[in-house]
Amino acid sequence: MKKQWLIILFIFLVSFNSISQSKVAHIDTYELITSMPEMIEVQKELGKQFKAKQEEVRLMEAELKSILKKYEIEVPDYSPEENQSRLEEIQGMEENIRMYMNQIYKNMQKKEEELTAPIMEKVFEVIQIVGKEQGFDYVIDSSKGQGVLLANGTDIMADVKIYLGF
């Protein structure tokens, strides 16, 4: 029994020693990606496209509001059936605007994913290259919310930025 404990203790010490020799670095990928010139350009382009779509929606809503005002004034001039039909027309227009807005958001998300995917791939490739070149066994993402509570080790942000050319 005593021999088994000694073997277990020996294995633990050997494994602890090898773990303590691992080289670990960290990088705040959120800070890196949001500061990249390519990503800044992507965000500007997406912002322009979104503003244009917002203007379209604003015009649609203004048209709807105008029709609604007109219909409200004309209520006494029409039969209850015709007013009901007009109400359904307004509700249909509102639903179309809502569906169009949802489609805009989906399209914008898809466009953002298309434009950012190559940037993300490039970043993670470069992080691996820099990490390997500098002899690190692990590179941990130190962005807020990633579970890293202390990042006193080597920060490879500057080296990655140089490698990426900015």
Image (tube, rainbow, N blue to C red):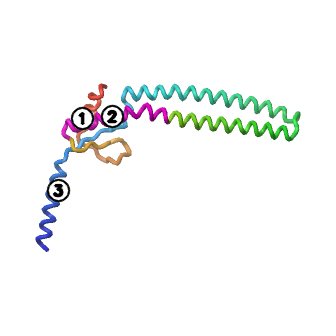
Label 3, label 1: how far apart the Cα atoms are: 27 Å
Q: What residue does disc 1 label? A: 130
Relative to 121, say whether 14 is above or below.
Answer: below
Span highlighted in magenta in the image: 110-135
**Secondary structure found at label 2:** helix
Q: Where residue 120 sits in the image (x, y, percent)? A: 37, 35
Mark before the other along the chain sequence, 3 or 1: 3
Label 1, label 2: how far apart the Cα atoms are: 10 Å
Tell me what residue is drawn at x 37 percent, y 43 percent: 144
Neighbourhood count class around disc 2 (C-alpha, 10 Å): few under 14, some 14–19, many 20 upward: many
Quadrant of the image containing the C terminus: top left
Q: Amino acid at mark 2?
A: Val
Relative to 131, say whether 17 is above or below.
Answer: below
Label 2, label 3: how far apart the Cα atoms are: 32 Å
Tell me what residue is drawn at x 44 percent, y 33 percent: 114
Q: What residue does disc 3 label? A: 15
Main SS, magenta residues: helix
Question: In this image, 117 relative to 68: left or right?
Answer: left
Task: Give the camera-side residue of 6 and 158.
Answer: 6
Task: Give the camera-side residue of 150 and 141.
Answer: 141
> Residue 111 lies in magenta, yes or no?
yes
Question: In this image, 96 relative to 22: left or right?
Answer: right
Q: What residue does disc 2 label? A: 123
Mark before the other along the chain sequence, 1 or 2: 2
**Secondary structure found at label 1:** helix
